[in-house]
Amino acid sequence: MRNDYLYAARKIFEEYYRECKIDLPEWFPKKPFNDYEERGKRWWQEKYKHHKELFQIRPDGTIYVEINELFKDPKEKDFALNMLGPGCINESSHILILNEKEFFEYIGEKKKLNPVIRLIKGLVKS
């Protein structure tokens, strides 16, 4: 199974219990624990929800994040970047640019306006 590092261990223990004719304990994990991923999703959901003004959604399908405003502590910044899901980061040097589609899917947020509509609205504002 993809990203299920304990799959083999679970299968070995299931076989062990079966051979010993012992029922699997109620607490026995039958599927992978994705605590780290779930924690990252919740963490970024909260950051986005409470600091939307620091996430600039651009017409090109990216999100520019005011990373130095969002994270004052460099350790927190490193932690935060490691908590992002695969494909979310477009660029992360001294600035953070996220891929809009992947980021919103990762945090479970509805995608914002179509980029073409956003572009037109941006031109109208100018």
Image: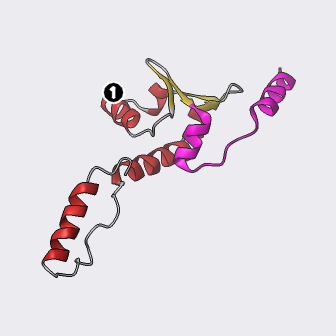
Is 71 situated above or below 19? above
Q: Nearer the viewer, residue 56 or 89?
A: 89
Q: How is the image coloured?
A: secondary structure
Residue 108 within the segment the image draws in magenta:
yes
Give how far across and how far down residue 94 sits, in percent. Answer: 44, 17
Q: Which residue of the protein is positioned furthest toward the right in this rendering?
A: 124
Residue holding disc 1: 74
Give how far across and how far down residue 106 sits, in percent. Answer: 52, 45
- Residue drawn where x is 51% and y is 34% of the image: 88
Dominant secondary structure of the residues highlighted in magenta in the image: helix
- Horizontal side of 125 relative to 106 (left or right) equals right
Location of residue 6 (image quadrant): bottom left
Is 13 situated above or below 118? below
Give how far across and how far down residue 54 sits, in percent. Answer: 56, 33
- Residue drawn where x is 72% and y is 27% of the image: 59
Q: Which residues are magenta?
A: 99-126
